[in-house]
Each structure stands twice: as C-alpha cells, then as structure tokens.
Image (tube, helix red, strand yellow):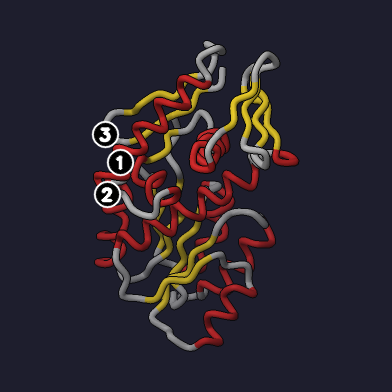
Amino acid sequence: MSKTKILYVEDELFLGKIVRESLESRGFEVIMEADGAKVTELFKKVKPDICVLDVMLPNKDGFTIADEIRELDEEVPIIFLTAKTQTEDVVKGFKLGGNDYIRKPFSMEELIVRIQNLLRSKTADTQKISGGTASIGKYNFQLNRQTLSNGKEEKKLSYRESELLKLLYQNRDKIIDRKDILNLLWGNDSFFNSRNLDVYITKLRSYLKEDPSLEIITIKGIGYRFVTG
C-alpha cells in the first residue's frame, strides 16, 4: 500500500526537520522544500495527496503558490501555516482555495488530525454513497433507512452501526485508524468507547457473514481494513 504523499513547504529548517520527521514517523511520505520559487514545478513532479504550505517564504509566498497549484489541481487539499493573525490573511487564504489554516506555533497532534480530516473528506467526496444507497457485495445498504438487505432478509441497523458501516465502506480497501473511528463516531477514544467499537465491529461482521468476499480485517495496534472483494 503506497504512503500518503505530503508536499511540505517551510523555510525554517529546524522546525521543518521536526515536522517532517514527526509526519514520517506516522507513516506519511514527506517531500520538503524551502524555496517558494521551486514549489510549483515540484508539485507537478511529485503529485502529492496534500500540501502543507508556510505563508512567509523566500522568493514566492504560500498564497501565490496555492493560487498556482489550484490552476493545476482543483481538488488537492491545502493547509496554510502562518504566524500571521490578521483575519484578512485567513480570508485571503480560503479565497485562494486553501482548505485549512493553522497558526504558529502549533502542536504536531493538531497538524496530523487536520491532515487526516482533509484526506478523509477527500476520500468521502470521491466515494460517496450515491443517493444514500450502496451495493456492498451481495448486500444493499440504505443509509437513510439504516437497513442492510441481501434479497432474502432485511436487517435494521442502529444509527451508530449504520455510520460505522458507512465509514468503512467509504474508506474500503484502506486502513482506517482505530482512534479516528472513535473520535468521529464517539467523540473520544476512551477505554469504554473502545470496547463499544469492538462490539460494533463484531456485529457488522455477523451481518455481512453471508458474503465471504466481504471482510473487516483487524490491523493489530492500528485499526481496520474493509475488504470488499
């Protein structure tokens, strides 16, 4: 499975080294550049999954770079990093196609969560459940009605069962971090909620057992992968 590629643009080299190593330790592939003038050509070459751009850069600022990137790719998520605090700078960043804006100094956990959220949103946008309905193997999943049917019988799902199945389906064949699931569906990753997630995963496995091509695989210490054939 290929790593998520992050184009990270930062001219503070000490900070850049810390951020790059932290992201790499989380399994991301990081392409780092300090010179604003080189970023657009680098973007064309590496085709990143997400861009993290410092605003104040030598030779070309992050806003200008974002504008050029948007000419090439309307969908790639862009996060701005800046020490500026003026509202007009934030507005300018979003008008130029930025998806998020983090003020310095920031925590690595905050940056990682925001990266994951944008990547998840992008995945959901490209793998939407059309009209609230999805064909999952031999099953028909109706999100709005919270039902799962196989032609012979229909199972009524609870709200959380339905949302968990939707999340697994939208990220099918990819590894989903257990903590991300807990934070999204339960609001935090407490021990109690973690045990609840185990119960819900067991329930969904039992609901899908009639189709052997479907499998919710536990990736020990990380999360789950929903294999759909």
Residue type (three-letter) at the residue carrying disc 1: Ser
Left or right of 212? Residue 141 is: right
Left or right of 55? Residue 110 is: left
Quick check: marks 3 and 1 in contact, CB under 8 Å? no
Question: What is the crowding at mark 3: few (fewer than 14 residues within 10 Å), some, or many (at least 20)?
Answer: few
- Along the polypeptide, which appears first: circle 3 or circle 1? 1
Residue type (three-letter) at the residue carrying disc 2: Ser
Q: Is residue 157 above or below residue 211?
A: below
Task: Name which residue lies at 64% across and 23% down.
Answer: 154
Quadrant (top left, top right, bottom left, bottom right) of the N terminus:
top left
Given residues 115 and 43, the one toward you in this image is 115
Count all numbered tags in the image, as a single digit. Answer: 3
Where is residue 60 drawn, in percent x and y?
52, 74
Left or right of 195? Residue 88 is: right
Task: Name which residue lies at 56% across and 13% down.
Answer: 211
Q: Nearer the viewer, mark 3 or mark 1?
A: 1
Quick check: marks 1 and 2 in contact, CB under 8 Å? yes
Task: Name which residue lies at 59% across and 54% down.
Answer: 76
Residue type (three-letter) at the residue carrying disc 3: Gly
CA gap between label 3 and label 1 equals 13 Å
Tell me the element at label 3. loop
Left or right of 113? Residue 135 is: right
Q: Nearer the viewer, mark 3 or mark 2?
A: 2
Q: Which mark is residue 190?
A: 2
Task: Name which residue lies at 53% across and 20% down.
Answer: 208
Where is residue 28 drawn, in percent x and y?
37, 45
Given residues 87 and 48, the one toward you in this image is 87
CA gap between label 3 and label 2 equals 15 Å
CA gap between label 1 and label 2 equals 6 Å
Q: What residue is pinned by disc 1?
A: 194
Quadrant (top left, top right, bottom left, bottom right) of the C terminus:
top right
- Along the polypeptide, which appears first: circle 3 or circle 2? 2
